[in-house]
Amino acid sequence: MTYKEFLSAVAIALTLIAFYPYIYSIVQGKTKPHVFSWVIWGSTTFVVFMAQLEDHGGVGAWPIGVSGIITIGVAIVAYLKRADITITPTDWVFFIAAMSSLPLWYFTSDPLWAVVILTIVDVFGFGPTLRKAYSYPFEEQLMFFALFAARNVIVIFALENYSLTTVLFPATIATACLLLMIMVRYRRQALSS
C-alpha cells in the first residue's frame, strides 16, 4: 500500500466514523434530517468526485466518492424513516444550481467549473446550519464537523494530482467546518457566561 492509498483509507475510515452515529440516529427516529438537502449534498459531492477523477485526483478522490454515496444513502434512509420531506423554493434553487454544473462541465469540457459551482452550493448549504448553530450552539455535534475537517485535509494530501479542480472542494469544506466549530465554541462560551 502506498502512502497516498494509506491516506485515502484513513480519510474513508473517518468518513464512516463520522456518518455512523448520524445514520444510526436516523434509524432510531431521533434525527429527522431534511431529505432534499441530503439529496443535494449527495449529488454535489458525487459530481465533485467525478470531476476529481477526471482531473487525475486518483486515490485521493475516493473518500469524496464514498462520502457522496453515503450522503445519498442518508437521504434514502431519511425518506424511508419519514423525515422532513418539505421542499422550499430555496431548496429548488440549490438543486438547480447543483445540476447546472453538469451541462457547464459538458459544454466547457472543463471539470473546474463544475467544482466551482458545486463548492459554492455546498458552502451555501452551511447557511441554515450556521444560523441554527448560532442560536442553539449546544445542539450541534462538533465531533461530526471535526472529523469532516480532518477527513478533507487528509483527502488533499492523498490526491495524486494537485489542481484547483481537485483541491478546491475539500479545502473549502474543511475551512467551512473549522469556521463553524469556532463559531459554535464562541457561542457556547458566550451563552455559558
Image (cartoon, grey):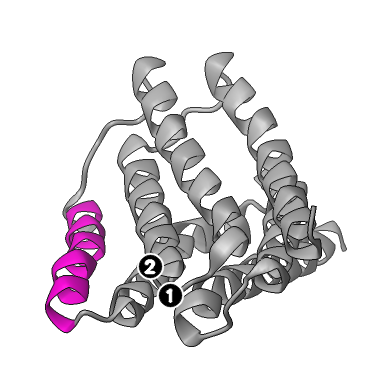
Residue found at the very far front of the displayed protein: 1
**Is residue 99 covered in magenta?**
yes
Residue 177 located within the stretch drawn in magenta: no
- Residue 20 locus on image (x, y percent): 67, 30
Task: Tell me if I can see residue 34 in this picture.
Answer: yes
The answer to whether residue 173 is above or below residue 79 is below
Where does label 1 land, which residue?
Answer: 55
SS class of the residue under badge 1? loop
> In the picture provided, is 89 more to the left or to the right than 36?
left
> How many other residues sit within 10 Å of disc 1, few (<14), some (14-19) or many (≥20)?
many
Q: What element carries label 2?
A: helix
Spatial CA distance of label 2 from label 1 is 6 Å
Query: In the rendered structure, which amino acid carries the disc numbered 1?
Result: Asp
- What residue do we see at 46% from left, 47% from top? 68
Most extreme residue toward the right is 193
Residue assigned mark 2? 51
What percent of the width, then of the height, locates residue 191? 78, 60
Is 8 rendered above or below residue 178? Answer: above
Q: In which quarter of the image is the C terminus?
A: bottom right
Q: What stretch is highlighted in magenta?
A: 91-108
Residue in view at x 21 percent, y 79 percent: 109
Please state which of the two labelled residues, at mark 2 or mark 1, is closer to the viewer.
1
Of 115 and 176, nearer the camera is 115
Q: Is residue 116 toward the left or the right of residue 167 in the image?
A: left
Q: Mark 2 Cα within 10 Å, few/some/many (few <14, many 20+)? A: many
